Image (cartoon, rainbow, N blue to C red):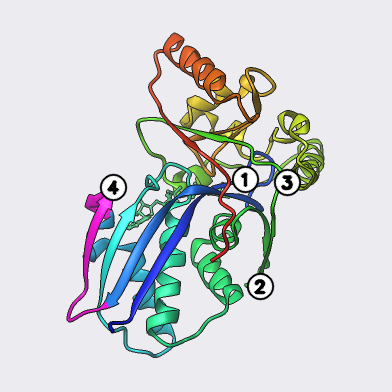
Amino acid sequence: MADVLKLRLPATSANLGPGFDALGLAMDFALEIEAREADRFSITSTGRNTAQTGDVDDSLVLETYRSVLDGQGIEAVPLHLDLHNEIPLGMGCGSSAAALVAGVMLASHFGGLGWSKHKVLTEASLREGHPDNVAACVLGGLTVSLMTAEGEVDALSIQPPVDWPLLVMMPDSSLSTKKARAMLPESYSKADTIANVQRVAMLTAAFAQGRGDLLALAMEDRMHQPYRSPACPLLPLLQPMAGNHGVLGVALSGAGPSVLLILESGSEDAAKEAVGKILSENGMNAEAVETKIFRDLM
Ligand SMILES: Nc1ncnc2c1ncn2[C@@H]1O[C@H](COP(=O)(O)OP(=O)(O)O)[C@@H](O)[C@H]1O
Ligand SMILES: N[C@@H](CCOP(=O)(O)O)C(=O)O
C-alpha cells in the first residue's frame, strides 16, 4: 500500500490582544493535506486561495519540505499533495504557520527524520520568526510560547474549561504579516509595558479558569493594535463591542486585518446582528466566520 500522510493543521489567532508573539488560539478551520510519493512534484488544490496554494513553484509547503531535507543532507522525494485549504492567506489567521508546520511534518515523515512534536514546533517557529501561531497549530487550544535569541522554543497548551464560540470578521483585502510588523515601534514606555504584562497574565489565567467576565479588560493591548489599527479598519469599529451584545472580548487576529471576537455561549446571533449593524452604518463589508476553539492534538 502506498505511503500516505494525512495532515489537518488548524488556523490560529495569535496575540489575543496583549500576548504579542506569545499567545495563540487554535481555531476549528484548517489546511488539510493528503501527501504521497510521486514521480514529480504536483498539487491538487481546493478551498481558499487555490491559485497560490496549488502553485507547485510557489508553494510554502513544498518549499519548506525541500528546505528542511536539504538542511539535513537528504534528497527530497517528489510528492503529490491533495490539498484543501480553509485558512485565508494574509488575513491574520495563521496560514503561513500552517503551511510551515505542514512542510516540516512532510519532511519528517517522507525524509525518515522521525522528529518529535517539540522539534517540529522549534523548526517551524524559527522559520516563521515567532512561535505563537506555530505553537497553537501544533498543540491546539490556547498556547503560551517563547523563543530565545539562541533558537530555543517552548510552548504549553491550556485547554479552557469552557467552549466560547468564536467569530472571526475578515475584511476584503489582506495584509502581510511582514508589513504589519514593520508598523511597530522599536521601544515602549514603562506604562505601556506594565499594562500589557498585567493583561497578558490576567488573560492566560482567565482562559485557564474559564472567566469570560475578565476578557474585555484582559484583551486590551498597547503594544501592536494601536499601531496596526490604521491598516485594519475593522478593529476600531468592533473593539468597543467588548462587554456588549454577548461579546466577551475583541482583538486583532494575529497581525490583522481580521478581528477575533470571543462570544458568550448562546450569543452568536445577537453578536452577529450587532456586528452587521455597525459594519453597514460605516459602509464596511466583511466575511463572518463562525468557529470554535480547536482542541484535538496531532
Ligand atoms: N498553503 C500555502 N501555499 C503557499 N503559500 C502560502 C500558503 N500559506 C501561506 N502562504 C504564504 O504565506 C503568506 C501569508 O502569510 P502571512 O503574511 O504571515 O499571513 P497569515 O499567516 O496571517 O495568513 C501568503 O501570502 C503566501 O505567500
Ligand atoms: N505575533 C505575530 C502574529 C502574526 O500572525 P499572523 O496570523 O498574522 O501571521 C504578529 O503579530 O506579528
In the rendered view of the protein, which quadrant contains the N terminus? Answer: bottom left
Dot 1 alpha-carbon crowd within 10 angstroms: few under 14, some 14 to 19, many 20 or more = many
**Which of marks 3 and 2 precedes in the sequence?**
2
Q: Nearer the viewer, residue 130 or 5?
A: 5
Q: Nearer the viewer, residue 29 or 149?
A: 29
* Separation (CA) of disc 1 from disc 3: 20 Å
Taking 54 as reference, is 19 left or right?
Answer: right
Disc 4 marks a residue whose amino acid type is Asn
Q: Are marks 2 and 3 in contact (CB under 8 Å)?
A: no
Dot 1 beta carbon under 8 Å from ligand 2? yes
Q: Disc 1 or 3, which lies upstream in sequence?
A: 1
Q: Which of the 4 quarters of the picture holds residue 172? A: top left
Residue closest to the eye, 85 or 198: 85
Q: Which residue matches tag 2?
A: 152
Q: Dot 2: few (<14), some (14–19), or many (≥20) neighbours within 10 Å?
A: few
Q: Circle 3 sits in a helix, a strand or a loop, which is it? A: loop
Q: Is residue 162 left or right of residue 166?
A: right
Q: CA distance from mark 1 to mark 4?
A: 24 Å
Whole-angstrom CA distance, mark 2 to mark 3, is 30 Å
- In the picture of the structure, the residue carrying the numbered disc 1 is 15
Name the residue: 29% across, 76% down.
36
Observer-side mark, 1 or 4, equals 4
Q: Earlier in the sequence, mark 4 or mark 2?
A: 4
Residue at mark 3 = 161
- The Cα atoms of the two marked residues, 2 and 1, are separated by 20 Å
* Residue appearing at x 71%, y 29% in the figure: 216
